[in-house]
Amino acid sequence: MSNYIPTIGVEVHVELKTKTKIFSNSTNGYGKMANSLTNVIDLGYPGTLPTLNEEVINLGIKAATILNCRIRKVMHFDRKNYFYPDISKNYQITQNETPIGYDGYVEITKSSGEKKKIYIEEMHIEEDTCKSAHRGTKTLLDFNRAGVPLIEIVTKPCLSDGEDVKLYLEKLKELLSYGNISDCKIEEGSMRADVNVSLRKEETDPLGVKAEIKNIGSISNAKLGVEKEIERQTKLYDKKETFKPQTRRFDDKIGDTVLMRIKETGNDYRYFPEPDIPFVVLTDEMIEEAVKTIPMLPDERREKYLNIGVSDINTNKLIQNRSLSDYFNELLEEKINHQIASNLLLGDISAYLNKEEKDIKETTLTKERFIELVNLVDNNTLTSKNLKEIINHILEETKSIKEIMEDNNIENITDDTEIRKVIKKIIEENEESVKDYKEGHDRAIKFLMGQVMKETKGKINPKMAMDTLKEELE
Amino acid sequence: MKEKLSKEEVLHVADLARISLTEEEISKYQIELKELLNDVEKINEVKGYDDDILIACWENNTELRKDEAGEMLDPKEVVNNAPRHSGNYIEVPVVISEGEGA
């Protein structure tokens, strides 16, 4: 156990899901041929002027709302000046003075059950830089990423351990991807996290020397990176060694952070207001319009699902699958057994979708047909065994489920009088087994059930038959 | 008012601009840069300057572009316009200090 108190702050960049770039109308895309998604603005050619993409402001308002931030109504952009080949203009257009959102929070639930608010200092809009790859003595530049809209979300230094960082990043990813703000793919770089870690002895001490961890490739690595960094700094303090503020990166192969560079001097970006972009003044109507289109978020979904009787496990599984959860949302008001509906979606239907690599929207399962299916399963007309046999037909044909059952000779005896008649007949014909059962031989009941199934050619609902059989044997 | 910048100040500015300077140039810029700064500082003498800084003259006229894709450049044209390229990539001398920028 460390004798020091860690102070951790996280900066996250997410790329926004727009069709075009923030300041030009070239396409915002990933995985395309290098330098094929650019125009003169992205390349910073002299004499070009940026124009601000409406959708970026729209998504910025939504993100600020989702992250419980206050929204700034009058904004401008600033130039952050630096010479580095990832930005050909020699400045990045960002929001230094007037970030669109500020004073927000997201809530995480720790493994101990404790709820904790992670406070957001500010979130601002800016342009992404071009992507550089270092090859021996050369650096290769791809400007497809240059000008892709970003929001940078900066927390207060209020996180205390690796778990906080992991849970915060997971929550952010869940919220922003559900909100259609970003696809938040860490592996593709559309979500990138930098974590600042420092240690101090007492809460009242000034903050310790800071190390920034960059290039974190996954959420689990973020947790591990923070834990390793706390360990490293603890050892140094214990040995009374000093160190300089530094930037480190997480190395996947060794599972630890390694030094990238020592920060000798503070940054000197000489920010000044961007004169090429007019002020942005948000009206109440603009904010209302944007907020109206925020889809139902995970916490609200969770509450609704639990309220209509869906189990904890199924609720969480549904929320992990956005497309199934959206489909399920259409059924919330229907008078059906929602637990059975969720079982079907997560069971046989998911199995089919995974195997066929399809989305539920690509199947023929309309809302009406799904409701019919849920009810047939709920009233025992369709057994799980029979469902498996016809699931492909259900998801590929447009006939009613009843018709599909008929086509496949599936009929189930669900009529109580009929079931009882068959069972009485079997009991009369098998006196020996009945005697065995009454003497405590459990195997006898399995034999009797087998006879019932044989008599009805398997068309009886097994659960109903078993219940009735037990009743008749008493 | 100081007559000239310190040597360190000139070297810091040179470092930000990624240029190297000879001793002779440093001495020259210690004076010339200071003269420039002195001229700019005269703006501070204007009354009311700090009250309400005018950043743009169209403060109440939000201009936004629709999110619709337009024409892009041919990648060949892009790379041929750079001093050096390697395939479809623009090539620059290796830069060690990773991770600047956004």
Image (spheres, rainbow, N blue to C red):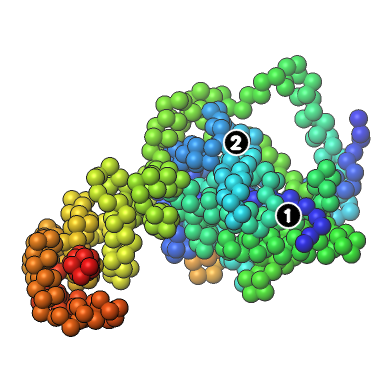
Q: Nearer the viewer, residue A467 or A333?
A: A467
Residue at 55% across / 66% down in the picture? B85
Instruction: Quickly name the residue at label 1.
Output: A197
Q: Position of residue A399 (x, y in %)?
A: 11, 59
Q: Quadrant of residue A408?
A: bottom left
Res. A314 image quadrant? bottom left
- Number of the label disc, if any, that sits on residue A102: 2
Question: Looking at the picture, does residue A45 appear above or below residue A377?
Answer: above
Name which residue type carries label 1: Val
Mark 1, residues whose alpha carbon is within 10 Å: few (<14), some, or many (≥20)? Answer: many
Give the left or right position of residue A457, taking residue A149 as reference. Answer: left
Q: Residues within 10 Å of mark 2 (few under 14, many from 20)?
A: many
The image shows residue A114 at horizontal and vertical percentages of: 61, 49
Identified at 84% across, 45% down, the residue is A205
Task: Answer left or right for B24 relative to A470.
Answer: right
In what element is the residue under mark 2?
A: strand
**Dot 1: chain letter:** A
Mark nearer the N terminus (2 vs 1): 2
Residue A88, given in percent of the width and then of the height, sits at 59, 52
Q: Are marks 2 and 1 in contact (CB under 8 Å)?
A: no
- Using the image as rendered, state which of residue A185 and residue B44 is in the foreground: A185
- Determine whether A126 is above or below A170 in the image: above
Q: Where is the N terminus of chain A found, in terms of image quarters?
A: bottom right
Q: Chain of mark 2?
A: A
